Amino acid sequence: MQQTYTLDRWENRSGHRLTWKFGYRGTVGEFGRIEVVYPARRHGDRHVTEVSGDTVPTTAFDGWAYGRKPSLYMGELSVGTAGIRLKRNRWAQTRAGRALRMQVAGREYRYVATSRRHRDRALMRSGVEIRTGRHGGGSRKKATLTVIGAADATDLALAAVLIGVNTRNLTRGGAVRAFFNRSLNWLEVFQ
């Protein structure tokens, strides 16, 4: 069983630029409406991406700010009120080795890059795979969730929140670009 759902991009640029919000929203089959907001909140140099919806648990990812989204660096994930421990091997050479690993509600998950591009990812657990992708540009930008298997609301919430997280470090090329970008930003401190 495979189903694909599309979330449309939205933005709210009212007020000061530090209060601007971005994200995706749409209807995901029997799970109803779902909305991804980034940054939902800011805490100094940390941003929070949050997912809410009709039936999905409120899920938040808090991490070091990289543009408008939080990054995996010092990331924290919560599903409902439960904090989730994140693990990844940043020195691995393969995409599978660099995968983000987590355990939610007694289930093991892996979030892995499925291509060299930073837009294609997959959240996997035993019997379920949710492929995520972002397509288009500007106001026509969309995010897709392709569900393979019998996914539940927690699976969809995890996949959706990770759409609003900068996950470039899941590929070697993305990690190299992020390293140089952080290094150049660090050097600006001394000027």
Image: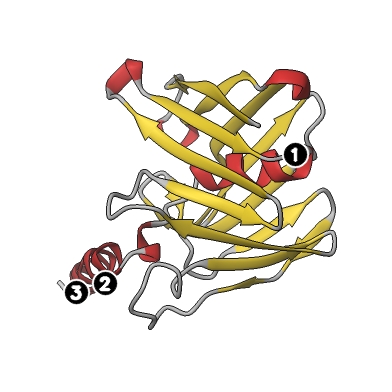
Helix, strand, or loop for circle 1?
loop
Spot occupied by residue 128 in the image (x, y as percentages of width and height): 67, 48
Work out whether 156 lies above or below 88.
Answer: above
Spot occupied by residue 176 in the image (x, y as percentages of width and height): 23, 70
Q: Amino acid at mark 3?
A: Leu
Spot occupied by residue 40 in the image (x, y as percentages of width and height): 59, 39
Q: Amino acid at mark 1?
A: Ala
Q: Identify which residue, 52 or 56, lies in the foreground.
A: 56
Q: What is the CA distance from the residue labelled 1 to the residue labelled 2?
A: 38 Å
Q: Is any atom of residue 56 visible in this view?
A: yes
Q: Which residue is mark 2?
A: 179
Spot occupied by residue 49 in the image (x, y as percentages of width and height): 57, 44
Q: Identify which residue, 159 or 18, lies in the foreground.
A: 159
Q: From the viewer's perspective, is 50 left or right of 119?
A: right
Q: From the viewer's perspective, is 122 left or right of 168?
A: right
Q: What is the CA distance from the residue labelled 3 to the residue labelled 2?
A: 12 Å
Q: Which residue is mark 3?
A: 187
Q: Is any atom of residue 41 visible in this view?
A: no
Looking at the image, is mark 1 or mark 3 nearer the viewer? 1
Q: Which residue is mark 1?
A: 150
Looking at the image, is mark 3 or mark 2 nearer the viewer? 2
Reading the chain from its start, which is encountered first: label 1 or label 3? 1
Helix, strand, or loop for circle 3?
helix
Q: From the viewer's perspective, is 174 left or right of 83?
A: left
